[in-house]
Image: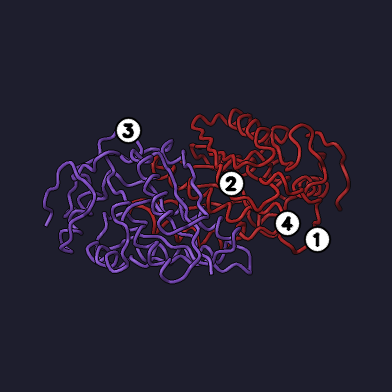
Chain colours: A red, B purple
Amino acid sequence: MRAVVLLSGGMDSLVTTAIAAHLGYELAALHINYGQRTEKRELVAFQKICDFYRIERRLEINFEHLSLIGGSSLTDLAMPVTTAKLHSKEIPTSYVAFRNANMLSVAVSWAEVIGANKIFIGAVDEDSSGYPDCRVNFFQAFNELIKHGTKPDTRIEIQTPVISLKKWEIVIKGMELEVPFEHSWSCYKSEHVACGVCDSCALRLRAFEQAGIRDPIEYKIRPSYI
Amino acid sequence: MRAVVLLSGGMDSLVTTAIAAHLGYELAALHINYGQRTEKRELVAFQKICDFYRIERRLEINFEHLSLIGGSSLTDLAMPVTTAKLHSKEIPTSYVAFRNANMLSVAVSWAEVIGANKIFIGAVDEDSSGYPDCRVNFFQAFNELIKHGTKPDTRIEIQTPVISLKKWEIVIKGMELEVPFEHSWSCYKSEHVACGVCDSCALRLRAFEQAGIRDPIEYKIRPSYI
């Protein structure tokens, strides 16, 4: 029973990895650098988490094209990272067009070659930043695509075990599974000490605050987001 | 009216480019190197075809991951390229798992950023080598995925103008549109003189033979496949 897990190194993918490990899958971990500002720091988190869960099969891939294409503050260094607006309905500037489809396509190619039949991804729907490719119906459509686009005897399915959880519930789930939150990295802006003010830091800090737990990583500033 | 065209440099993508140009689209051409044996030669074909159609916006992307993942004789140099068996129902060794999904995902990311609303791809269904991601229902599923995975105001649709044509009909279509077949490259095996015996050469030679036209490129050997 083998599965590919998309492991960015953030808290959602960490908890997703813990869930998949807990279910007994032999894991193969996929990490994708797509020219994001913090890619080196994320890679460290990826390696530490793989070590923790004793994942031997690891694949790091460079997606230079997502930065060549541009259009996102995550990958285009000329665009400022916006400060979090957690109650806005707008798609933030950190949106990378169709990013999850690019990542899942690689995961499916790899899964088909290594004989894995599940792909775990730590996407979060409701409580997320509003990216269109993080929603349940996107993953349902992707599962349909896999059926049509792989060999007739291939059975691969995307699993999104945290998609309907609130971020604070993901923290609780992580605590239950004793995940090493100290190894994870979420900040979009800095690689040294987490900034505490980008979208990703804000969502993470709020989640820990709502769960009543202190996030073990260090922040430059630690505002309250409740 | 802007469109992205996936342009490998082979005859199907060449004729597809000609069709899109004929329809009046302002074209942006995407070429993907995925570690295939003949990638340098294909890149030359891509550039010559872009020059011919005066396509200014060009994007060349390296997909190292498809060769890292392996599993195909196209990208794995340890696997021999099989000689064509045109009447076999088996998926050939040149199959790269989920390749078109990987390529189309990049095309959608790019299209969303540059404001293109069509993506042209020269996939051929019936008369093709039997790859699962070249069929009509795969592209329909991909169009559904795009609706779910892009911004609400984005309208991008995959166009497959040659999908239901026989290869020889693509040759005829190309002749009607006066495409520069001499600039295209199809061989999977060689970068200098086309081998004439790999799957791709065999399909191409048979197509020209059935169309009653001599393929203008040079072949090492030129067997009859009718």
Three-letter amino acid code of the residue under disc 4: Pro
Circle nearer the N terminus (4, 1): 1
Q: Which residue is mark 3?
A: B77
Q: Amino acid at mark 3?
A: Leu
Query: In the rendered image, which residue does mark 1 sit on?
Result: A87
**Looking at the image, which is closer to me, B150 or B52?**
B52
Please give the label number shown on residue A92. Answer: 4
Q: In the image shown, does A175 or A132 lie closer to the viewer?
A: A132
Q: For numbered disc 1, what is the local secondary structure? A: loop
Quadrant of residue A196 in the image?
A: top right
Q: Quadrant of the C terminus of chain B?
A: bottom left
Residue B124 in the image, given as x and y percentages of width and height: 31, 61
Q: Position of residue B184 (x, y in %)?
A: 32, 51
Query: Share a chain, discs 3 and 4?
Result: no
Question: Mark 1 to mark 2: distance in Å?
Answer: 31 Å
Q: Which residue is mark 2?
A: A68
Q: How far is the residue under mark 3 from the one under mark 4?
A: 43 Å
Eye-nearest disc, 4 or 1: 4
Q: Residue at x 27, y 65 (%)?
A: B175
Q: Nearer the viewer, mark 1 or mark 2?
A: 2
Which SS class for mark 4? loop
Q: Earlier in the sequence, mark 2 or mark 4?
A: 2
- Give the chain of mark 3: B
Query: Distance of mark 2 from mark 3, alpha carbons?
Result: 28 Å
Dot 2: chain letter: A
Asked whether disc 2 touches disc 4, contact meaning CB atoms under 8 Å apart, the reply is no
Please tell me whether mark 3 sits on a helix, a strand or a loop: loop
State whether discs 2 and 3 lie on one chain. no
